[in-house]
Image (cartoon, rainbow, N blue to C red):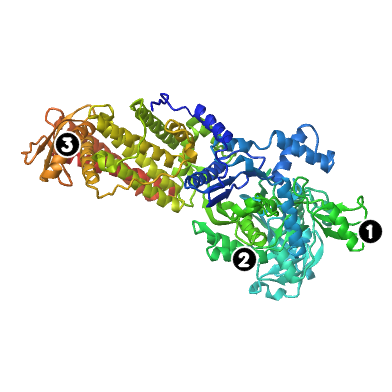
Amino acid sequence: MKSHLPDRYDPESVEPKWNQIWEEKKTFAPDTSRKETFSIVIPPPNVTGNLHIGHALNHTIQDIIIRIERKKGKNVVWVPGMDHAGIATQVVVERELAKEGKSRTDFTREEFIEKVWEWKAHSGGMIAKQQRLLGESVDWSKERFTFDEGLSKAVIKVFRTLFDEGLIYRGERIINWCPVTKTAISDIEVEYKEKQGKLYHIRYPKAEFKSKDPKTLGAGEYIVVATTRPETMFGDVAVCAHPDDKRYSALKDKFVFLPIAEKEIPVLFDSFVDQEFGSGLVKITPAHDPNDYEASQRLKLTPINIMNLDGTLNEHTGKYNGLDRFEARKRVVEELESKGYIEKIETHIHSVGHNQRGGAVIEPLLSTQWFVKIESLAKPAIEVVKSGKVQFQPKMWEKTYFEWMENIRDWCISRQLWWGHRIPAYYAPNGDMVVAESFEEAITLFQKKGISISADTIKQDEDVLDTWFSSGLWPFSVFGWPEKTEELKQYYPTSVLVTGFDIIFFWVARMIMNGLKFMGDVPFHKVLIHGLVRDKDGKKFSKSLGNVVDPLDMMSKYGTDSFRFFLAAVLPEGKDILFDESRLDGYRSFCNKIWNSSRFIFMNLPEDFSPKELDLNSLEDTDLWILHEFDSMLGRYEKAYSGYLFFEMANAIYDFVWGSFCDWYLELTKARVYGNVTPESAEKARQVLVSVLKKSLGLLHPFMPFITEEIHSLLEPKELAKTEFPKAYGVSATSPAVVRMELVREIITKIRNMRAELGVKPEKKCKVILKCANKELKEMMERESKSILQLSKAESLEFLDSYELKNTDSVGAFSIGEIILPLEGIFDFEKEKQRLEKEKKQIQSEMEKLENKINNPSFLEKAKPDVVEKEREKYNTWKEKLESTIRALEKIGT
């Protein structure tokens, strides 16, 4: 076997080549001949989306797992797919129509939906192409879409079942309303931002003083209510205080006058009021605040909705009818001020909900919507996590899950959109309603109820279902449910779910509830939670901050393998990743190291070389040592994988390949592979090099699929993706050969360190003397003298029982003796001493400046904590340099 690699690794030619080969050969199709199954379903990204860095992290983690489990001989399936993303997709298509001067209302519902399908066919699904670029080993023949016919049937089946069991109902509750997209939205689509607003303290006269000029009201004749939204006063139905607040106990059964609206409202008491906020009094506006709505239900108050669906005020607001909510706020405040109702106005920082799609401020709004009664579904979903049947990793996220699930509220599932799964509720002209799985079944159900109806008079509900309703069925709908398919039997429950912590409530919890309800089993046994990717300063990626990183740019610039390895190598368990592009260059260098080392091996293989099974009994010390190093690394790798600690896996294989294999074994065996030894020794070295390279590629492959597949293709025709997981060689750490080689490595490392500490230049070769009393080990070291000479850059090597030291000698200890470097003639001790003394003074000067700064009370008081911390870090760095300089001075006899 004589194979060659090009001079340099070119990701741009290698990556597309292997993507095409894998897909053409159906490399990632499940192998149903294998008994043990392993399955993962990809969290379906939005059809409107592009591959962002969060996707890249999430998908890389899944691909590492899938590639390892495939190598471990399992029947593996990794199902890709996309979410129809109701709001996001409709917004995109409406934006495109707006460019033509049109809106969706210029079309019928059916015509608009056809436009959306056209958009999906031409522009949607870009993310699937980008997933291929990332090297994801999914089975593309199993790609699913939440709007596929089969998945849509599953959605309707679930809705019908829950409705028939009384778990879905239509009712009036407070929801998140977007006045721009004119639809209810889920909690996850509300992004809360800290905003500087105003807190308006408004005088509400006591009823008996309502005719008095507000400007002349005296103490005790009015109360003060604080609000951030004075325009909602028209919807006030009461003022509320805490039952324990003695300041207002005299107001029991009393009324106050509502300014501008000019009506009397009662003063009531409820424990939800925060006595410390504002005046300790709150206005109750049930139609526009969730807490107020809950209080109104307890206090039996009737809500008043004062807002239209487009965010303008309605007929309940008198002269403000038709005004936009923010303009109305401005004018209401002006009227309150002019009439003397404003006590004071304060600047107020508060959290304001915005729609993630477009940024509109969300309105809490009382609305008639469809809801799921969630409590009975949540209880078993809580128990499976408590019992350990579903395990979160890291475990700390279980607490977050429980906190939400144990305080869960009914789920609003209806959306006022046209793109989505239309709610399967049908209405007769008399207002009667049925829920059916088809139009035809609806007519039959009406007839059974004795209602005579024709096809042209029946009307389907206009709303569609929340996207999370369909994605919550994903782990079983993708396998054909509600049909009892063979795939469903094989691959459900799935093995592990990999996701971010931000959708634990909205997706993970709902999948668990649905799986238990409709499959009678959990949808997965492990939930692997990873952190977010942030910029190197810890900030979220944001277009407004200008810090967004496009993973496709990183892959193009550094190669996909470097990018993937980076994501895994810097992923701390359950914590956020700080993205520092400079580190990618280091992993590109790692790719080059793998490539160049492989190229060196191939260049030194004879034409007739054929890999053989290694005979451990015939191998030399260096050979057995590298096999042990591999075994040791494999143990670290597998232990880390058992806990999904990808950064430990990456670091284990990185340290071995770069350090033990390339920097040590390759260098130690160069003389052998060049043929400067016996043919038998050369053949053994080559066999070991190829064997260890091949197994190392197998462990690198889940992280770096492209470069490893390319190199491996020169070793055997079978794709590396389908080869078995590497096995250990079985070389013990106590093997005499390993012990001896560790000693050689210790000596070489010690010599290198001594030279570095003294500042001996790399091109300067010096003599090395080894004092060793152990005759057997001394003889062994003599056998390895060539290696020691070569790797420590020594001019000569002597083994002595005794030696009289000179003042120009440097001495260092190793485990069984001493290392002496005679430096006379190659090292100017006096000149080096002067240089180090000068450096020592400069360091001390810098330290003194920093010490004065970090001990200055004025600096500590004014500077931000992170600035103070950076200055302390600088001081500690200089301190380490000083200690190193002092040690160097000691080495040369000062």
Residue designated by label 2:
380
**Viewed as shown, does residue 2 lie left or right of 238?**
left
Q: Kindly state the secondary structure of the residue where label 1 is placed.
A: loop
Note whether residue 539 is visible.
Answer: no
Q: How far apart are the alpha carbons under marks 2 and 3?
A: 69 Å
Please give the residue where the numbered disc 1 appears in the rendered image. Answer: 452
Circle 2 SS class: helix
If you read the primary sequence from the N terminus, does the residue marked by circle 2 or circle 1 appear first?
A: 2
> What's the residue type where badge 1 is placed?
Ser
Mark 2 belongs to which amino acid?
Pro
Mark linked to residue 523: none
Q: Residues within 10 Å of mark 2 (few under 14, many from 20)?
A: some
> Residue placed farthest to the top in the image?
7
In the picture of the structure, the residue carrying the numbered disc 3 is: 783
x, y (%) of residue 867? Answer: 42, 45
Label 2 to label 1, Cα distance in Å?
A: 42 Å
> Could you tell which of marks 2 and 3 lies nearer the N-terminus?
2
- Label 1, label 3: how many angstroms apart (C-alpha)? 102 Å
Q: Quadrant of the C terminus?
A: top left
Q: Which quadrant, please, contains the N terminus?
A: top left
